[in-house]
């Protein structure tokens, strides 16, 4: 036999073991990519839900910014498809208000916890809590 002749013992291509090792490495890489993709999709979903929550809160805040929980302890306001409901509870008992010089003012004041629920088309979009000062006029202004 000459040098150019291939003996029967030499093989060409991959052995079965080499093919199995290559497929195992490929499968491990593919599984890690799949796990990364699934984790990314969950993160995108969480961000989307949080954005919807923030948008609902931003839409609701103007509807409750002038709320006086002492006079309206519970209620609701609607604007188009947006509905805002609230209930309030006193955190501290009512107290007489004070002027800048320390004398009693014409108002009674109280601190309230206000639970706000935001609904859009009847579906709850957000739920959050505010602290608001409640007030009511209890005396008349005295003319000097």
Image (cartoon, grey):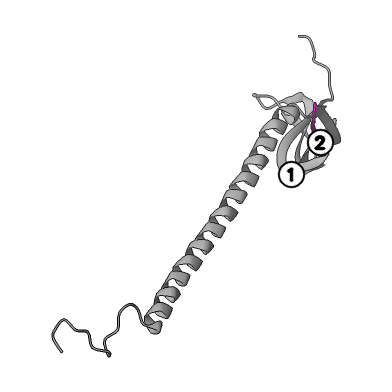
Mark number, residue 10 = none
Label 1: few (<14), some or many (≥20) within 10 Å? Answer: some
Nearer to us in this view, 39 or 30? 30
Determine which quarter of the picture holds residue 87: top right
Q: Position of residue 102 (x, y in %)?
A: 67, 27
Q: Is residue 26 magenta?
A: no
Please name the residue shown 13% across and 86% down the image.
Answer: 2
For mark 2, give the secondary structure. Answer: loop
Q: Position of residue 20 (x, y in %)?
A: 43, 79
Label 2: few (<14), some or many (≥20) within 10 Å? Answer: few
Nearer to us in this view, 137 or 58? 58
Compared with residue 21, is residue 87 higher up or lower down, i.e. above or below? above
Please name the residue shown 75% across and 30% down the image.
Answer: 64
Q: Earlier in the sequence, mark 2 or mark 1?
A: 2
Compared with residue 138, is residue 33 higher up or lower down, i.e. above or below? below
Q: Quadrant of the C terminus?
A: top right
Q: Position of residue 29 (x, y in %)?
A: 44, 67
Please name the residue shown 15% across and 89% down the image.
Answer: 1
Residue 94 placement, left or right of 13? right
For the residues marked 2 and 1, what is the alpha-carbon distance in whole angstroms? Answer: 15 Å
Q: Position of residue 5 (x, y in %)?
A: 19, 84
User: What secondary structure prevails in the magenta region?
Assistant: strand
Mark number, residue 127 = 1
For mark 1, give the secondary structure. Answer: strand
Q: Residue furthest top?
A: 144
- Mark 2 vs mark 1, foreground winner is 2
Q: Which residues are magenta?
A: 80-85
- Residue that badge 2 annotates: 121
Nearer to us in this view, 30 or 115? 30
Compared with residue 2, is residue 135 higher up or lower down, i.e. above or below? above
């Amino acid at each position: 036999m000459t040098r150019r002749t291939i003996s029967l013992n030499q093989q060409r291509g991959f052995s079965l073991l080499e093919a199995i090792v290559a497929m195992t490495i490929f499968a491990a890489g593919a599984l890690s990519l799949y796990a990364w993709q699934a984790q990314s999709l969950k993160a995108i979903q969480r961000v989307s839900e949080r954005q919807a929550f923030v948008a609902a809160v931003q839409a609701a805040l103007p509807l409750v910014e002038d709320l006086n929980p002492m006079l309206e302890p519970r209620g609701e306001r609607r604007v188009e498809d947006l509905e805002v409901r609230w209930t309030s509870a006193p955190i501290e008992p009512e107290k007489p208000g004070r002027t800048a010089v320390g004398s009693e003012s014409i108002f009674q004041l109280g601190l309230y916890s206000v639970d706000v629920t935001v609904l859009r088309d009847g579906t709850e979009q957000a739920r959050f809590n505010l602290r608001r000062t409640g007030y009511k006029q209890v005396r008349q202004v005295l003319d000097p």
